[in-house]
């Protein structure tokens, strides 16, 4: 009787029986997620195509969520916006001020360097648009032109 209580194969069998319904439920959830992701991908593709068609018909059309410069219907990058959102400008200004000593030294900043930072929330092309806006507003200044034509800015 005590042997049954400590028999490792019996314990393993009991645990396997307990785990089986959980595994089945997990498999079902995984299948549901795959279906939902496929549906979402199809909806996003359709939305991108509709936005593209609307932009062709109405050049003044701007997507309501400000998602310009994202991947388009064919998976290719669309052109970045010519002006960033005020929220993005404020967020970048806050990040630059937080790390002021890093961005006022001789190294400066480029859109590529900022994009490679772990705490950077924007794409490299959108970062360039934000930096150009900050330059126009006098928040940063163009320090020099680097190799390959990179604009190297410093915080004013």
Image (cartoon, helix red, strand yellow):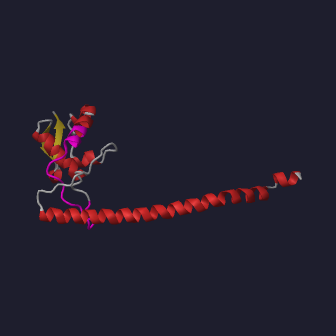
Q: Which residues are magenta?
A: 71-91
Front-lying residue, 130 or 154: 130
Would you say the magenta stretch is mainly helix, strand or loop?
Answer: loop
**Residue that extends furthest to the right in the rendered view of this protein:** 1
Percent coordinates x, y for residue 64 in the rendering: 22, 52
29 on left or right of 87? right
| Residue 142 visible in the displayed image | no
Placement of 113 over or under 79, stated as above or below: above
* Residue drawn at point x = 17 percent, y = 63 percent: 54
| Residue 32 visible in the displayed image | yes
Percent coordinates x, y for residue 152 in the rendering: 17, 44
Percent coordinates x, y for residue 7 in the rendering: 82, 55
Check residue 15 for magenta coloring: no
Front-lying residue, 2 or 125: 2
Percent coordinates x, y for residue 85 in the rendering: 19, 45
**Residue that extends furthest to the bottom in the rendered view of this protein:** 74
Placement of 89 over or under 21, stated as above or below: above
Q: Quarter-wise, where is residue 88 in the image?
A: top left
Q: Quarter-wise, where is residue 79 in the image?
A: bottom left
Marker count (numbered): 0
Name the quarter where the C terminus is drawn.
Answer: top left
15 on left or right of 71? right
Check residue 81 for magenta coloring: yes
Front-lying residue, 82 or 41: 41
* Residue drawn at point x = 28 percent, y = 32 percent: 98
* Residue drawn at point x = 70 percent, y = 60 percent: 17
């Amino acid at each position: 009787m005590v042997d049954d209580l400590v028999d490792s194969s019996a314990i393993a069998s009991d645990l396997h029986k307990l785990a089986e319904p959980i595994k089945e439920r997990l498999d079902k959830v995984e299948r549901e997620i795959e279906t939902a992701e496929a549906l979402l991908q199809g909806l996003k593709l359709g939305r991108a195509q509709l936005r593209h068609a609307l932009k062709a018909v109405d050049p003044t059309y701007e997507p309501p969520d400000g998602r310009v410069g994202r991947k388009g219907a064919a998976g290719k990058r669309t052109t970045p916006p010519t002006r960033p959102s005020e929220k993005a400008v404020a967020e970048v200004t806050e990040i630059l001020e937080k790390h002021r000593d890093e961005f006022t030294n001789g190294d400066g900043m480029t859109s590529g360097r900022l994009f490679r930072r772990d705490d950077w929330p924007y794409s490299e092309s959108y970062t360039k648009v934000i930096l150009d806006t900050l330059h126009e507003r006098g928040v940063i200044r163009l320090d020099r032109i680097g190799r390959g034509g990179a604009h190297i800015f410093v915080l004013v």
